Image (cartoon, rainbow, N blue to C red):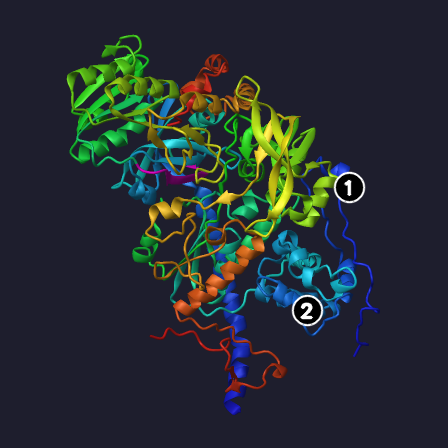
Amino acid sequence: MLFMRLELNQSNTRPRRVTEIITLVWNWAMTMTEATQRAGFEILGREDFSELTYALVIHHPLMARAARPGQFVIAMSHEAGERIPLTIADFDRKNGTITLVIQAVGKTTKEMQQTCKVGTALYALVGPMGVPSPVGAARKVVCVGGGLGVAPIFPQARGFKEHGAYVIGVLGFRTEKLIFWREKFNACCDELILCTDDGSAGLKGFVSNGIELAVSRHRDIDEVVAIGPPLMMKACAETTRPHAIKTVVSLNPIMVDGTGMCGGCRVKVGDQVKFACVDGPDFDGHKVDFSDLMMRLRRYAAEEKTAMRRWSENCRMKDHVGSAAREPQLPAQLAPDLMSELLELPDPIDDVLGG
Amino acid sequence: MAKKKTIRTIPQQRTPMREQPAHERVKNFAEVACGYSAENALREAERCLLCPDQPCVDGCPVGIDIPGFIRKLGEKDVRGAYDTLTATNLLPAICGRVCPQESQCEGVCTVGDSLEPVAIGRLERWLGDTAIAEGWVNIPYIEPNEFKIGIVGSGPAGVACAAEMAKAGCEVVVYEAFHRPGGVLRYGIPDFRLPNDVIDAEVNNLSRLGVKFECNTLVGRLFTIEQMIDEMGFDAVFIATGAGYPTMLGIPGDSLNGVLSANELLTRCNLMRAKEFPNYDTPMPIERHVAVIGAGNTAMDAMRVCLRLGAEKVHCIYRRSRTECPARAEEVHHAEEEGVEFHWLTNPVAILDDGSGGVRGMRCIRMELGEPDDSGRRRPIPVPSSEQEFEIDLVVFAIGTNANPIIGQTSELRLDKRGYIEVDEHLATSMAGVFAGGDIVTGAATVIEAMGAGRKAARSIKNYLRIRDCSRDYGTEGKFGAGMLFGLGLGEQNFARVRVG
């Protein structure tokens, strides 16, 4: 009985004090978590390839470790932003970074071009998403990247090379000035075929011409992997169809969550409906219904235009009001005229490969 | 001692809850039901007979001590009532709003045999809201142990399990793929039913219990379940990823622009705040005539969101009759008040193209009810040559969900034929230390059923880790009774946490 009393007395007081301490510690821990959350995902490096294309190097050691060729992320630049899918263009396990290559074509990507500087952070970044591309089996592959597809094809080319395949790179740009990552591709491709629309570098013509060239040189190609705007991927699939070469395309339709929950990214492949985010993003190019994909990509074209117009008006107003106090500006901002030119949006199907 | 209450002496009418009038609320996202005042709540508490059978406790999937908290309310001990309630349910403000009480606690209420049942849900909600307003938190003294628990998904099942495990003294980390925690509570349930502030407050309470929320983390892809156990030092993992993979219509025209899943509509509107476009970047254009296919709670939410986003006419297309409709009665009633047009016994056959990839209309067929099917509901059969066309510009389908495939794709866990995770009666999966519950096991169900699964999983995890609960409660003398030894109860409640074996 006495023992019980004793313990009762002790424990009547002790937990209360401990609770207080624990509460203090928790409050502190919570402020700490909030602080780290506010920090988001830090941008360690940035490179501008042209007026429209830029690369962001983002600190995320866990994702750098997990990422495989062909996977993508969903990023939000700020709390009120939209979730945009971007293919992982490179990952560096040693330094714990991933690289995203972004083309400024819509409101969000243009805004990111202005705000995402070294030292700032993305509000949200989740991934790696999607089924990784199998890079182990093929012995001789053609890796095709057109426009925005150039950066995302890089991890695949490197992956194939690491697995001992003979890699033929086919890269398409509009003109010589826009070429980037040439050395990176040279390092992982056994052959590199450059194509430019105006013939200023390499082959004059489209990537499909490059594929023709590769096919004429090599009779034993196991696989063609093509990433780029839907029209380009369609052209690639049509080029390889007569040769019956397995052709994989990476689709990037409109997504919200990227975890198979909304169904917004559904695509028709053969007679099936697939979700690009969890069943893809890689599909058999000979079976994909590209016209369905292109139609669905135009779903929010009107709203995108509204957002774009409103945003660029805001930008111009800010330019007008506070140009003195501004930080060093980026190319797009320096030329307000360019902004108004860009108001006429490119067809949304051109910007599907956000990165 | 007050006179014993009988069915004759209690207030005969259920205390009404103030609601925004239908014509006003369709223009805003504020809550439809405004909640009880303190007087309302105390009056409604009077209606409980405190009957000895307590059918309501059995009716509740998590077994809340309903008469217990109502008795405290009757004694005007609001804090005490809150403490009793939160002993079982840490999210009263959420459950009071979203549980289908009429088929659970209120459905079996003794008062309900002859009068309207006690408004248990409204009382629960009032207590939850009062606690949030007053800043009450119950942080019990928790003796930490060395166990680390990983929870995949911050929806209702995940948070229920997280709360239990944190109270047991474990270090708990909850992973969420979205940028804000809450799962379906956040992305699925609209503000006018469950305001974001309420979710924030309840999530905050869990954080104060020591639960850590890690957003922007897609488990399975960023790291696998196997890695959580083998490399990241988790002693047990609970998978609560939900169903969430929307079922497609599978009729001609279902890939047209202007055909989308209720999940997409609701996520855009609730989580991404499309209703505030262009201040928020995510758009959700609503056309004039909307058809929502299905008549579950998700369908009701989708329809009412469409009305608030400016739709002129919203049709509900359901192939069975009103009797079989799975939504909460209150939701159907609200949707009706707000002007949704219901078409019972109607099934879509085709969605019509407007020539430029959009929707022009929908062709539907009349149905009639035949013999009961596996689900016990009467099977709908098409009536020949009864097709009719609706003029529609937006089609939202809310016809159920399938299992989310990501965990299945990335782990060795055994799945059933339909892709759901296979578990035994203790919610243990085929992998040691890994448990699963909620929609990813049962298929789409309700918030409270998922929370029930979360609590059940927590019990199993404690068993698996040989954790005994230790909420040493040195209360008043009166609490000590039979079965005590040196002030320690012989029941599981009072043993120190030790790992044996």
> Is residue B374 visible to the viewer in this orientation of the structure?
yes
Could you tell which of marks 1 and 2 lies nearer the N-terminus? Answer: 1
Q: Gap in Å between the C-alphas at discs 1 and 2?
A: 32 Å
Chain for disc number 2 = B
In this view, the residue in front, A325 or A137, is: A137
The percent coordinates of residue A301 (x first, y second) are 52, 21
The percent coordinates of residue A233 (x first, y second) are 34, 21
Based on the picture, tell me whether residue A100 belongs to the magenta stretch. no
> Is residue B163 visible to the viewer in this orientation of the structure?
no
Chain for disc number 1 = B
What is the quadrant of residue A231 in the picture?
A: top left
Contact flag, marks 1 and 2 (Cβ < 8 Å)? no
> Residue beneath label 2, please?
B67
Vertical placement of A111 versus A93: above or below? above
In this view, the residue in front, A347 or B400, is: B400
> Residue beneath label 1, please?
B21
Amino acid at pointer 2: Pro
The percent coordinates of residue B309 (x first, y second) are 65, 32
What is the quadrant of residue B285 in the picture?
A: top right
Q: Tell me the quarter of the image containing the C terminus of chain A.
A: top left
In this view, the residue in front, B82 or A9, is: B82
- Seen at 68% across and 69% down, the residue is B67
**Dot 1: what SS?**
loop
The stretch of residues the image draws in magenta is A120-132
**Dot 2: what SS?**
helix
Vertical placement of B193 versus A297: above or below? below
Amino acid at pointer 1: Pro
The percent coordinates of residue B313 (x first, y second) are 69, 30
Query: Taken as a whole, is the magenta stretch helix, strand or loop?
Result: strand
